[in-house]
Image: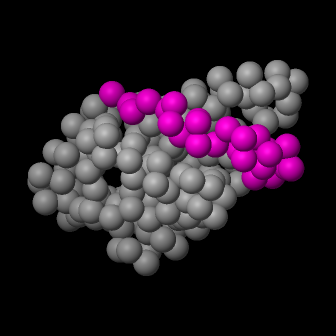
Protein backbone atom coordinates (compact mmCIF):
# COMPACT_ATOMS: atom_id res chain seq x y z
CA UNK A 1 0.00 0.00 0.00
CA UNK A 2 1.18 3.54 -0.73
CA UNK A 3 0.77 5.74 2.33
CA UNK A 4 1.10 9.53 2.22
CA UNK A 5 2.07 11.26 5.45
CA UNK A 6 2.26 14.98 6.16
CA UNK A 7 5.02 16.22 8.49
CA UNK A 8 3.74 19.21 10.45
CA UNK A 9 1.28 18.26 13.20
CA UNK A 10 1.31 14.65 12.00
CA UNK A 11 4.92 13.51 12.45
CA UNK A 12 5.87 16.58 14.50
CA UNK A 13 4.19 18.93 16.99
CA UNK A 14 4.86 21.98 14.81
CA UNK A 15 1.92 24.12 15.93
CA UNK A 16 3.15 23.93 19.53
CA UNK A 17 6.62 25.10 18.46
CA UNK A 18 5.02 27.83 16.35
CA UNK A 19 2.96 29.16 19.26
CA UNK A 20 6.15 29.80 21.27
CA UNK A 21 7.54 31.90 18.43
CA UNK A 22 4.26 33.76 17.94
CA UNK A 23 4.25 34.71 21.62
CA UNK A 24 7.87 35.84 21.40
CA UNK A 25 7.33 37.66 18.09
CA UNK A 26 4.25 39.67 19.00
CA UNK A 27 1.52 38.86 21.50
CA UNK A 28 -0.90 41.20 19.73
CA UNK A 29 -0.41 39.80 16.26
CA UNK A 30 -3.06 38.15 14.13
CA UNK A 31 -0.76 35.27 13.23
CA UNK A 32 -2.47 32.89 15.66
CA UNK A 33 -5.78 33.48 13.82
CA UNK A 34 -4.28 31.94 10.67
CA UNK A 35 -2.74 28.78 12.15
CA UNK A 36 -4.71 26.40 9.93
CA UNK A 37 -3.77 28.28 6.76
CA UNK A 38 -0.13 28.56 7.84
CA UNK A 39 0.05 24.81 8.51
CA UNK A 40 -1.04 24.27 4.87
CA UNK A 41 1.78 26.52 3.68
CA UNK A 42 -0.45 29.49 2.97
CA UNK A 43 0.85 32.95 3.82
CA UNK A 44 -2.28 35.16 3.86
CA UNK A 45 -0.68 38.41 5.10
CA UNK A 46 2.61 40.28 4.79
CA UNK A 47 3.01 40.01 8.58
CA UNK A 48 2.91 36.20 8.32
CA UNK A 49 5.39 36.17 5.43
CA UNK A 50 7.79 38.30 7.49
CA UNK A 51 7.24 36.14 10.58
CA UNK A 52 8.23 33.01 8.61
CA UNK A 53 11.22 34.67 6.97
CA UNK A 54 12.50 35.40 10.48
CA UNK A 55 11.36 32.27 12.35
CA UNK A 56 10.41 29.46 9.95
CA UNK A 57 13.55 27.35 10.10
CA UNK A 58 13.77 27.69 13.88
CA UNK A 59 10.14 26.58 14.24
CA UNK A 60 10.86 23.49 12.13
CA UNK A 61 14.03 22.79 14.16
CA UNK A 62 12.20 23.13 17.48
CA UNK A 63 9.23 20.92 16.58
CA UNK A 64 9.42 17.57 18.35
CA UNK A 65 8.57 14.20 16.85
CA UNK A 66 5.28 12.76 18.07
CA UNK A 67 5.39 9.68 20.27
CA UNK A 68 5.63 6.42 18.28
CA UNK A 69 5.85 8.16 14.88
CA UNK A 70 9.24 6.70 13.95
CA UNK A 71 8.35 3.24 15.28
CA UNK A 72 5.01 3.00 13.44
CA UNK A 73 6.44 4.35 10.17
CA UNK A 74 9.24 1.77 10.33
CA UNK A 75 6.73 -1.00 11.04
CA UNK A 76 4.67 0.08 8.03
CA UNK A 77 7.79 0.04 5.85
CA UNK A 78 8.79 -3.38 7.21
CA UNK A 79 5.35 -4.69 6.20
CA UNK A 80 6.04 -3.81 2.55
CA UNK A 81 4.21 -0.48 2.48
CA UNK A 82 5.65 2.55 0.73
CA UNK A 83 5.81 5.78 2.73
CA UNK A 84 5.55 9.07 0.86
CA UNK A 85 6.22 12.16 2.95
CA UNK A 86 3.99 14.79 1.33
CA UNK A 87 4.59 18.24 2.78
CA UNK A 88 4.02 21.92 2.11
CA UNK A 89 7.54 22.51 3.40
CA UNK A 90 9.98 23.43 0.69
CA UNK A 91 12.10 26.20 -0.72
CA UNK A 92 9.17 27.80 -2.51
CA UNK A 93 7.77 29.29 0.73
CA UNK A 94 10.15 28.22 3.49
CA UNK A 95 13.72 29.02 2.48
CA UNK A 96 16.20 26.55 3.94
CA UNK A 97 13.51 24.06 4.93
CA UNK A 98 14.32 21.18 2.57
CA UNK A 99 17.84 20.41 3.81
CA UNK A 100 16.76 21.06 7.40
CA UNK A 101 13.84 18.64 6.98
CA UNK A 102 15.98 15.91 5.43
CA UNK A 103 18.49 16.19 8.30
CA UNK A 104 15.68 16.28 10.89
CA UNK A 105 14.04 13.14 9.48
CA UNK A 106 17.37 11.31 9.36
CA UNK A 107 18.33 12.37 12.91
CA UNK A 108 14.94 11.22 14.25
CA UNK A 109 15.07 7.92 12.32
CA UNK A 110 11.99 8.73 10.22
CA UNK A 111 12.46 6.52 7.16
CA UNK A 112 10.45 6.87 3.97
CA UNK A 113 10.29 5.80 0.34
CA UNK A 114 10.04 9.30 -1.14
CA UNK A 115 9.61 12.88 0.04
CA UNK A 116 7.61 15.41 -1.96
CA UNK A 117 8.23 19.05 -1.00
CA UNK A 118 6.15 22.11 -1.98
CA UNK A 119 2.95 20.03 -2.04
CA UNK A 120 0.23 22.68 -1.96
CA UNK A 121 -2.28 20.64 -3.97
CA UNK A 122 -2.16 17.42 -2.01
CA UNK A 123 -5.12 15.73 -3.73
CA UNK A 124 -3.32 16.10 -7.08
CA UNK A 125 0.01 14.97 -5.58
CA UNK A 126 -1.71 11.92 -4.05
CA UNK A 127 -3.44 11.06 -7.32
CA UNK A 128 -0.25 11.53 -9.38
CA UNK A 129 1.68 9.25 -7.00
CA UNK A 130 -1.08 6.62 -6.64
CA UNK A 131 -1.39 7.13 -2.88
CA UNK A 132 -3.88 4.74 -1.27
CA UNK A 133 -4.31 6.66 1.99
CA UNK A 134 -3.15 10.13 3.07
CA UNK A 135 -2.67 11.22 6.68
CA UNK A 136 -2.80 14.97 7.22
CA UNK A 137 -3.84 17.48 9.88
CA UNK A 138 -5.57 19.68 7.29
CA UNK A 139 -9.31 19.04 7.07
CA UNK A 140 -9.29 20.94 3.76
CA UNK A 141 -6.66 18.66 2.21
CA UNK A 142 -8.29 15.49 3.59
CA UNK A 143 -11.67 16.49 2.16
CA UNK A 144 -10.13 17.24 -1.25
CA UNK A 145 -8.39 13.86 -1.21
CA UNK A 146 -11.61 12.08 -0.24
CA UNK A 147 -13.42 13.78 -3.16
CA UNK A 148 -10.86 12.10 -5.45
CA UNK A 149 -12.00 8.68 -4.11
CA UNK A 150 -8.87 8.13 -2.06
CA UNK A 151 -8.76 7.39 1.65
CA UNK A 152 -7.76 10.20 4.00
CA UNK A 153 -7.26 10.19 7.76
CA UNK A 154 -7.33 13.43 9.73
CA UNK A 155 -4.68 13.56 12.46
CA UNK A 156 -6.18 15.61 15.28
CA UNK A 157 -4.26 18.74 16.10
CA UNK A 158 -4.64 22.19 17.57
CA UNK A 159 -5.55 23.61 14.15
CA UNK A 160 -8.35 21.19 13.24
CA UNK A 161 -10.03 20.39 16.55
CA UNK A 162 -13.04 22.56 15.67
CA UNK A 163 -13.34 21.32 12.08
CA UNK A 164 -16.67 19.58 11.53
CA UNK A 165 -15.80 16.93 8.96
CA UNK A 166 -16.94 13.49 7.99
CA UNK A 167 -13.49 11.91 8.05
CA UNK A 168 -11.84 9.25 10.16
CA UNK A 169 -9.79 10.97 12.88
CA UNK A 170 -6.91 9.77 15.03
CA UNK A 171 -5.26 11.22 18.12
CA UNK A 172 -1.94 9.40 18.03
CA UNK A 173 0.27 7.05 16.05
CA UNK A 174 -1.04 3.85 17.65
CA UNK A 175 -4.61 4.74 16.61
CA UNK A 176 -3.29 5.67 13.19
CA UNK A 177 -1.59 2.30 12.75
CA UNK A 178 -4.88 0.53 13.53
CA UNK A 179 -6.79 2.69 11.00
CA UNK A 180 -4.17 2.06 8.31
CA UNK A 181 -4.29 -1.71 8.85
CA UNK A 182 -8.12 -1.59 8.70
CA UNK A 183 -7.89 0.22 5.34
CA UNK A 184 -5.22 -2.21 4.16
CA UNK A 185 -7.55 -5.14 4.87
CA UNK A 186 -10.02 -3.64 2.36
CA UNK A 187 -7.50 -4.14 -0.49
The residue drawn where x is 43% and y is 78% is 128
* Viewer-side residue, 182 vs 175: 175
Residue 2 percent across, percent down from the top left: 28, 64
The residue drawn where x is 85% and y is 49% is 45
Residue 123 vs 26, above or below: the answer is below
Question: Quadrant of the rendered structure where residue 158 is?
Answer: top right
Residue 94 percent across, percent down from the top left: 63, 54
Q: How many marks?
A: 0
> On the rendered image, what quadrant is the C terminus found in?
bottom left
Question: Quadrant of the rendered structure where residue 121 is?
Answer: bottom right
The residue drawn where x is 87% and y is 24% is 28
Looking at the image, the residue that sits furthest to the bottom is 128
> On the rendered image, what quadrant is the N terminus found in?
bottom left
Q: Was residue 46 drawn as part of the magenta stretch in this picture?
A: yes
Residue 168 can be seen, yes or no: no
Residue 14 vs 132, above or below: the answer is above
What's drawn in magenta, residue-wise?
A: 43-67
Residue 54 percent across, percent down from the top left: 72, 41
Question: Quadrant of the rendered structure where residue 173 is?
Answer: top left
Residue 69 percent across, percent down from the top left: 31, 37
* Viewer-side residue, 63 vs 8: 63
The residue drawn where x is 18% and y is 54% is 77
Residue 146 vs 12, above or below: the answer is below
Chief secondary structure of the magenta portion:
helix
* Viewer-side residue, 72 vs 127: 72
Amino acid sequence: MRIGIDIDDVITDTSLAMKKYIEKYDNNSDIHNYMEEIMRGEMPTEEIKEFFRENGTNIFKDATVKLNASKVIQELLNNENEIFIITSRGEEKFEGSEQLTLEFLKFNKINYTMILFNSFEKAKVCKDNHIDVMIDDSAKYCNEIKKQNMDAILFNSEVNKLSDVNLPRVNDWIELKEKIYAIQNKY
